[in-house]
Image (spheres, rainbow, N blue to C red):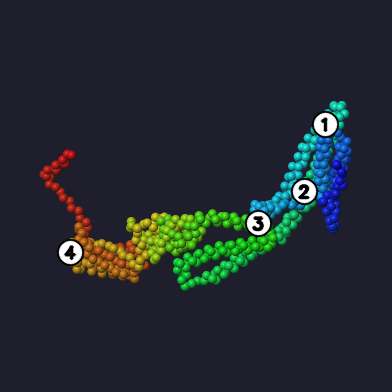
Amino acid sequence: MFSQAVEAPPPVLAAAEEAPSIDSPLVASPEAISSLETIQALIQANLDAQQELRNEFKSADASSLSGVQQQLDELTADLKQLRKSLEQSAIGSVDTSVFNEEEAGFDWQVELSQILMPIVDNLKALTEKPRRISSLLTSVERLSKQREAIVMAMENIDAELEAIGQPDLQASLGSIRKSWKRRLSDNDQKTKLAKLQLNELQNSDTKWWNSAKSGLLEFIKGRGLTLFLAFCFAVVVWHGLRGLFNLILTKRAFADHPDFRTRKRLAQYVFRAVSFMIVLVVVVAVFYVRGDMLLLGLAIIAVVGLALGLRQAVPRFYHEARLLLDLGSIRENERVMYNGLPWQVVSLNVHSVLRNPELTGVVRLPLKQMGELVSRPAGKEPWFPASKNDYLLLDNGLFRQVVRLTPEVIELQSGGGSITSVPSNEFYRWTFENLSRGETYAIPAVFGIDYQLQDISLSTVAPRLREAIEYAIMHSDYKQSLKQVQVEFKAAGASSLDFWIYVTMQSSAVTGLFKIERMIQQACVKVCTEENWGIPFPHMTVQQLPASAPPAPPPPAI
């Protein structure tokens, strides 16, 4: 029933015998030769033991057949493992997993795993040597524990053999001891083989800089060249499409029309999206032609991730897309109120730009915040109530010059040179008179004369005062800026006849505001002095009650 088959040489050894010779053949180490001889001796011993069991099986009775068959099965398994050990010892540290072939499947998950396999393989290759060293260390530790258990088992069997005198039991225990002895030899051989492979990995003759140099050269010639070609093709295609777009979208006569700007913006974003897709296709095509499955897999993953991201992001950013296309509640070149100040929408983008022509600096806002604002056409209205170097007359009578305007603060300078800083949004709410914004400004004044001049107040006084004021200004540094002098009777006051004086000056003479006011009063006083006109002063009338007058009655009680 049992026949000893002639053992064929292992496939790897047979292939090695048929392989052509190389110029510099490897020389086997004495340790490797010794290991091969030991394993071969164990194989031969197992074959002899197997033949003995087969002979015993033929002459055994029915009660012992099962025990002999079990021993034969164990020998067969040990013999198979020894032959694998012999093959592995003969080929050294060569990884035989590369010869494993997997059956092709038709499941889409399997197909996807095959696409991702190059990525996983490359990641595994980066840590292949450390993983193999760790695996061999673990194997050596496990084999050491197994050897301790085997030695302990054999010691127990030896002790029992010495204590037992029954021949049949001794024969059974002897057979068990042989099995454990073979297991000990197999364990020693596996330990020796694992240590040999570990020594080869840890004491490699290849220097690290040689490995780095060869790896770098391999990258430059292979994957590096692929990446460089993909980058060059992407740049050429992008600039080519951009040049074609600029050639098609030339400036038209109605380019400033809002509808044209909207269509142009829409065309620009569509062009960018289409150009990006074309460039992506070109890059993937380069990876495919070059046959780099790792880069191709990474590109496919990137495309799928981008598609999934856009599928979830587009509905959320629909409002922002309308703003980018200049179709939302806020539009370019229109006026919008932000932080209490008017701004011009210069550009709508991921970070939009707001500018006030009168202020130094700009404000950049994210597109999401821009969606909360509402703009309107600006027209020709002013962007700010004051400009740099304007002169202002505040409500409290202070005279100030604007020296700096920023989105955060407005700086005002007094005549003495001191600076007052005011927050821009607060300054925008002030009420003041800008003397520099118009072509002219006016200086009003009031001057009173005595009631004794009532008969000439309407015929003589007003023209005389006007002549004196004009003469004073024309003989000053502001003669080129005088526009008009008006003097009219205003009202009969409590103690004087008051005249209304209104002098109109050009804005170029705004710095002489207070000096011209003083000149007006000086000219009026000079006229009164020359004409001997009286200048009244306020009178206060005091009434004294008689001493005999009875006291006033007290108020009635409530």
Q: Which residue is mark 4?
A: 454
Identified at 69% across, 60% down, the residue is 291
Quarter of the image for residue 54 reads top right
User: What numbered label is drawn on residue 157?
Assistant: 1
Q: Give the label, 3 or 4, closer to the camera.
A: 3
Asked which secondary structure carries label 1, the reply is helix
The amino acid beneath tag 2 is Leu
Asked which secondary structure carries label 2, the reply is helix
Which badge, 3 or 2, comes first in the chain's sequence? 2
User: What numbered label is drawn on residue 392?
Assistant: none
Asked which secondary structure carries label 3, the reply is helix
Q: Residues within 10 Å of mark 1 (few under 14, many from 20)?
A: some
Identified at 35% across, 66% down, the residue is 438
Q: CA distance from mark 2 to mark 1?
A: 39 Å
Q: Which residue is mark 2?
A: 201
Which badge, 3 or 1, comes first in the chain's sequence? 1
Tag 3–tag 4 contact (CB < 8 Å): no
Tag 3–tag 2 contact (CB < 8 Å): no
Quarter of the figure with the N terminus: top right
Which badge, 2 or 1, comes first in the chain's sequence? 1
Q: Which residue is mark 3?
A: 297
